[in-house]
Amino acid sequence: MQQTQTKPGNVSQLLSQLNESATLAMARLSRELAQQGHPIVSLSLGEPDFNTPEFIKDAAKKALDDNITHYPPVNGIVEVRKAIAEKFQRDNGLTYTADQIVISTGAKQAIANTIYALVNPGDEVIMPSPFWVSYAEMVRLVGGIPVMLPATVEHDFKITAAQLEQAINTKTKLIIYSSPCNPTGSVYSREELAAFAEVILRKEELYVISDEIYEHINFSGKTASIAAIPGMMDRTITVNGVSKAFAMTGWRIGFIGAPKWIADACNKMQGQITSGANSIAQMATKAAMEADPEVIAPMIETFRKRRDLVYTLLSEIPGLKLNKPEGAFYFFPDVSSYFGKRNGDDVIHNATDLSMYLLKTEHVAVVTGDAFGDADCIRISYATAEETLKEALKRIARGLATLK
């Protein structure tokens, strides 16, 4: 009988350089503690607590009945790509054809496809910091060099065009940002993006990934797309999806609109990794894209009320510095005033220590800001019920008050 290998082998050098997603790691640890009987309140994952709207589920059921269960084209079912192109025109003022759309297994894969398609070893990729956890790791996987441009809570976690211009050099190939932003909730205005565009267009072969997955969860008005700035359509890869605004996280559908040569490159990349995204989920996405965005207005209003509640509760905790997010469903408070404090044997040196302290003592799961490029902050998701948020914030306030 063949013996089972008990000693782990050596993983590849590539994998050994890769950090685990901090958000997923905290979610995993929270589940493990909950299974052990601990009363965990998790504010770690960015997942709406709403269910997928019925009309979208009905579209999926119809797709099953219509036997749309075969391999789809790698870049997506053409009628779904056409619906996405129409959405881009309606909501963003962007004119894409169906062959400029690539549908992927989540926006995460759409971003990874693009980075693999454009970035060579040694290329620099600029990302305003704080940034979404996977950007830097994706860049490192292809041998690229992440260049973080710091933005602080005092400036609403937004960089300036002057900062961007100073960071660009001959090695710069790509800029990647999210607006509304994960983890800060900050939203760039059209005027701010136009200033960025003026800088970007001065350098040839410089491209932008505009991550707009939180587009509809914007409390300040319509989200601006940098691709709509004159001259930027040929320089921009616009990323979006259905997971956040339509409460479709488990359906795993994201997509890009891009210059055709970039869309073709992403199609080629995806063809060797996953091929086409789930056909049933694509038809559900078609229904979401064809719907008037007003159908999700009640959900967005609920997020606004939760934002206001959490802002009030966080503002009452001494020592926290925070902005009032204009979008997404996160707070990213600066907690550095608690560094150097302790409770018994627990000493807080950084945001990671503080996150683990709150999990250990108060059973509240948040995510260290270090994973997002700012070691002074923690990320708090408010994509959960008000009563849960009140309980979590009460525990956080109690836990911080015990640090001396």
Image (cartoon, rainbow, N blue to C red):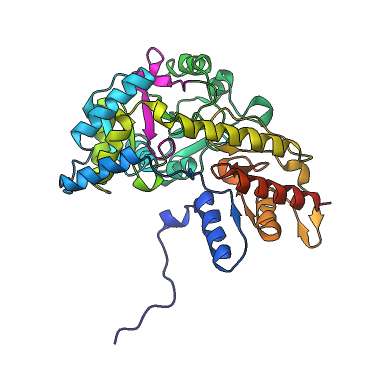
> Looking at the figure, which quarter contains the N terminus?
bottom left
Q: Is residue 183 magenta?
A: no
The magenta stretch spans residue 242: yes
Extreme residue toward the bottom, this view: 1
Which quadrant of the figure has residue 322? Answer: top right
Q: Residue at x 15, y 44 (%)?
A: 66
Determine the image quadrant of residue 72. top left
Q: Nearer the viewer, residue 309 or 199?
A: 309
Q: Is residue 19 above or below residue 241?
A: below
Of the pair 230 and 144, the residue shown nearer to us: 230
Q: Which residues are magenta?
A: 222-246
Residue 289 position (above or below residue 189): below
Which residue is rendered at x = 73% and y = 35% of the image?
A: 315
Which of the 4 image quadrants contains residue 166? top right
Looking at this view, is 292 or 238 the one in front?
A: 292
Where is residue 74 shown, x and y percent of the image?
21, 41
With 329 as the anchor, is 152 left or right in this view? right
Q: Nearer the viewer, residue 47 or 354?
A: 47
- Tell me where residue 290 appears, x and y as whole percent: 29, 28
- Image position of 289 (left or right of 350): left
Residue 176 appears anywhere in the view: no
Estimate the x, y position of residue 46 in percent, counting from the top left: 51, 44
